[in-house]
Structure formats: C-alpha cells, structure tokens
Image (cartoon, rainbow, N blue to C red):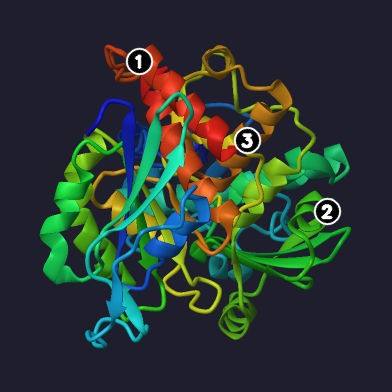
C-alpha cells in the first residue's frame, strides 16, 4: 500500500449492498466489474461483482482513503483475506433476507475473525425492515460465542447516514485502542 | 444476583435445625437473591415458624413431611393466619427434614418478592415519576419471573421479564414519549393471561425500553455509578435501531475495550457530562453495562501503537472529510 493511502474493506454475501455502500461515500463513481449474474442460486439480482469494487475518498494533502468491496461469491473467498491485509477495518454486510444469514455471518467471520486484533470489524445487517428475523440480538449472541465484542447495527446502506454510522463505529473502535 | 442483606430468623425450631439452617445459609453465599444471614432477633425479613401444634421441647424430632411456614415482612392477607391452606398454596413453607435446595429455592422466591415490594415502596415515596422509577423497575425485572402490567401517564405496558420483552398500547408512539412517560402504578398479572398476550401480540425488547428511558432521562447520573466504581460495556448498543447522540458511538468504542470509572471516562474522552450521563444510564438500563470488581493490569490504556498520535490524526482527518 502506498504511503498516504489507507484502506477500508466492505465485505459480505452477494447482494448485501457492498457496491451501494461504497458508492454512497466515495468521491468518485465506484469502479465495479459488474456482469450478468449467472449464479442465481446465491442471489436473484441481475448483475453482480465478479472482481472487486473500488471507490476512494480524498483526505487532502495527497492522502486517500481507499474503499474496496470484496466479491460476494464463495468461490472468490481467497480474495477476501488478501484484500483485508493491512486494512484499517472491515465492514461486514449481512443480508437478512437470505435463507440463513447467521450462517453467512459465520462464514465471513471464520475468515476475518483473526483480523479483529489488528483492525476493526463492524457488522451491518440489511433488509431488517422487510425481514425482521433473525433479530440483531441474535447476531450479537452469535458473535459473543466467539468472545468478540463487535458493533452490530441494523443498516440500510442506501442511506448515507447508515453507512456513516458503520464507519463511525469502525473509527471509534480504532481510536479507543490508541487513546 | 443482588447484594441486599436479608435476615432469616426462626421461631419454635430446635437447636439442631437452627445449626443446620445457619450452615446452609453460609453455603448459599452468592447463590441467593440478596445475601441471607441468620439472625437471633428482630427485625427479620423472613421467619421460619414451626407448626404450632408440634414443636416445643421435642423440636428435634423432625417429623417427616411436617411443614415449617415462612412469615415475611411483606404485607399479606395471610399474616393473621400463618398456617392456612392459602399460604400453603402460595408455597411459603418448607418441609421437614429441611433440604438445602428447598430452602434455597424459597429464599430466592422471597428475595424476589421483597425486591418487588421495596421497589413499590420506593416508587410510592418518589411519587411514581422520573428516571429512577423506571430504573428501579428495569433492574427488578432482570431477576423477575412474573409478568407485570405498568400504567404510565401515556399508556399501559405489559412486561414479560423472562423473555425480556414488553408491549404497550401505543406501539407507534415516538420512543421519546414512551420512555418519558411517568409510572403511575404497576402490578403482577396472571401468568396465563400474560402468556396469551405474549403469543398474540408483537412485542419489543426491554433493552429497547431501558435504552430510551436512559437516553431521554434528565441527564442526572443514576446512583448506581460511583466515581471510583469500574465498569465495562459488554455489548455495543444497536445504534441502527436505537435513538442516540452521535457522540455515543466513540463512547461505546472506549467502553467496549476498557474497564473504566466515571471519572476516568470524563478525562479520557472530554465527553460533555450530561450526554455522558445519558449514555451511561441508557447502557445500564439495557443490561449491556456491567460493573466489575477488579481490573486487569494495564486497564487504563488501550493497545497504543508506537505511532498513536499519527493514527489518531489520520482518524480525525477521515472523520472531518466524511462529516462524522
């Protein structure tokens, strides 16, 4: 990573809203490699990201905050870990409308759990208004089984306010370690 | 479990039984609702009374299945007639020979009843209003198994402590209004009726209610917090669903990673006192904040990196750019 470039990774299952979340805060139109979705067993959306999403935020004086979205499909899971290396933190998005979203969360935590020592992990649960179960409380219980204390919020990533809340929690976690 | 000290006395029991009860109370330390001690003289919180027909000089005969009734300081219609069938139905007795588990169960049952009565008395004394009234109720419900009806100035609530849920007559009322309503009275409700209501209606979590009671409270720190009493946040509140002040997020960041006291927290974050108090009250009333007895070494400082100042500067610049 270049000096003056810092990375935050958005991860989560297919259709969880990674591309949308990056687009909400990025200074540039997010660069995505969306193609027709041929894997409708995972999600029925028309297009999906097969590579990575990319956005950036200019911090002045040449510094940049780079926003990466991981590919959602499990067959690209080797990419998740690579992208997470040296990131400030990971925002993990869970789609509550999926058949077993708690299992989705666990699959991603299996990969990212070790990262919680060096960076911050924040979890956003999407589509809770149309799919109220499992409840956010159920996710907390699941995470607590791993002896982790992570921020878990209901979040609609189409709303900038919600994406900023996730980023605020990520920064707050990092700041608390340095105070 | 609570730490209130309770006193158990005996009337009409023989020396062997008294010794047995004393030894049981020592064994129960830390396992009961409140800390029970044996007392030779009044005042008692509960009194084990031998059946009047039986024991005097032959108190140690311990007739099988004979009952010892339990009198409590609680106001009760049975007090005038301690050995009625009604008292038996209320289960305020233990059978001889006294079994440890049976006595433990009864003391816990009485502890909950005493807590309930004391909360009622405190509420009556305070005029059933303000943050503290809700605080007393919310803390009492942590150990309660009965269901309750709470009448407030806004509407009626039905509370199910076991499932940590509640429902109210005005589910669409703004959180601020619900949490700011003053408590007028509350009472236990029939378990069958409570179960029916719980099945038939959509309920909200008690943590949600506790949070908003604290958040919309008057900003005075609850008496549970002392300047030198350390605590930690065991869980992040769901700021996606709970109304909050933006500064609560960094507060939660600190409190989920450190064991701190109120005075340390004030100096650590430069947090405005009234907002800090509302946050702490809200966290306490959700049950997410826990007081801890001892602190690990290095409790005050986090895992500061060598370039902590530089990193804090970076986080500030990101915040500034994103407007958070």
Q: Label 3's element?
A: helix
Residue pictured at 61% horizontal, 85% vertical: B200
Image quadrant in which you'd find residue A62: top left
Residue pictured at 42% horizontal, 17% vertical: A179
In the picture, the disc for residue B308 is: 1
Q: Label 2's element?
A: loop
Residue pictured at 61% horizontal, 56% vertical: B208
In the picture, the disc for residue B279 is: 3
Residue A107, how many percent across, how many down?
20, 63
Structural distance between the alpha carbons of marks 2 and 1? 45 Å
Q: Can the viewer see residue A104? A: yes
Residue, disc 2: B181
Q: Is residue B303 above or below residue A47?
A: above
Q: Is residue B26 above or below residue A101?
A: above
Q: Can the viewer see residue B94? A: no
Name the side, left or right, on which B200 lies relative to B133.
left
Circle 2 chain: B
- Earlier residue among tags 3 and 2: 2
- Earlier residue among tags 1 and 3: 3
Closest to the observer, A87 or B91: A87
Residue pictured at 46% horizontal, 51% vertical: A28
- Earlier residue among tags 2 and 1: 2
In the picture, the disc for residue A132 is: none
Circle 1 chain: B
Q: Nearer the viewer, mark 1 or mark 3?
A: 1
């Amino acid at each position: 990573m270049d000096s003056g470039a810092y990375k935050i990774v958005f991860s989560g299952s297919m259709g969880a809203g990674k591309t949308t979340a990056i687009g909400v805060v990025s200074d540039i139109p997010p660069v995505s490699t969306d193609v027709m979705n041929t894997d409708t067993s995972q999600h029925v959306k028309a297009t999906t990201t097969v590579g990575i999403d990319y956005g950036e935020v200019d911090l002045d004086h040449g510094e940049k905050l780079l926003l990466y979205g991981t590919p959602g499909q499990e067959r690209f899971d080797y990419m998740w870990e690579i992208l997470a290396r040296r990131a400030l933190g990971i925002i993990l998005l869970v789609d509550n409308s999926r058949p077993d979203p708690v299992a989705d969360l666990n699959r991603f935590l299996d990969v990212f759990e070790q990262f919680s020592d060096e960076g911050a992990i924040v979890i956003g649960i999407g589509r809770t208004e149309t799919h109220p179960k499992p409840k956010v409380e159920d996710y907390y219980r699941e995470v607590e089984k791993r002896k982790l204390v992570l921020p878990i919020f209901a979040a609609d990533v189409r709303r900038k306010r919600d994406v900023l809340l996730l980023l605020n929690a990520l920064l707050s976690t990092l700041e608390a370690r340095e105070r | 479990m609570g730490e209130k000290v309770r006193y158990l006395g005996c009337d009409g029991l023989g020396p062997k039984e008294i010794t047995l009860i004393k030894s049981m109370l020592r064994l129960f330390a830390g396992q009961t609702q409140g800390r029970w001690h044996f007392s030779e003289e009044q005042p008692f919180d509960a009194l084990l009374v031998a059946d009047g027909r039986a024991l005097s000089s032959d108190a140690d005969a311990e007739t099988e299945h004979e009952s010892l009734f339990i009198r409590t300081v609680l106001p009760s219609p049975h007090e005038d007639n301690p050995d009625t069938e009604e008292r038996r139905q209320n289960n305020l007795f233990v059978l001889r020979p006294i079994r440890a588990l049976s006595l433990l169960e009864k003391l816990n049952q009485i502890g909950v009843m005493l807590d309930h009565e004391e909360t009622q008395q405190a509420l009556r004394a305070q005029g059933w209003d303000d943050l503290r009234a809700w605080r007393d109720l919310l803390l009492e419900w942590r150990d309660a198994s009965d269901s309750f009806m709470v009448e407030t100035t806004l509407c009626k609530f039905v509370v199910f402590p076991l499932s940590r849920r509640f429902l109210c007559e005005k589910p669409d009322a703004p959180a601020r209004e619900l949490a700011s309503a003053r408590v007028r009275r509350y009472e236990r409700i029939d378990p069958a009726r409570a179960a029916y209501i719980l099945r038939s209606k959509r309920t909200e979590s008690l943590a949600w209610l506790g949070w908003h009671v604290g958040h919309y409270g008057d900003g005075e720190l609850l008496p549970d917090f002392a300047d030198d009493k350390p605590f930690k946040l065991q869980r992040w509140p769901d700021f996606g669903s709970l109304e909050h002040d933006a500064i609560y997020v960094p507060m939660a960041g600190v409190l989920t990673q450190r064991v701190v006291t109120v005075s340390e927290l004030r100096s650590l974050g430069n947090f405005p006192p009234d907002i800090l108090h509302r946050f702490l009250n809200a966290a306490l009333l959700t049950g997410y904040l826990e007081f801890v007895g001892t602190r690990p070494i290095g409790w005050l400082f986090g895992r500061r990196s060598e370039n902590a100042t530089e990193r804090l500067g970076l986080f500030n610049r990101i915040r500034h750019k994103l407007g958070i």
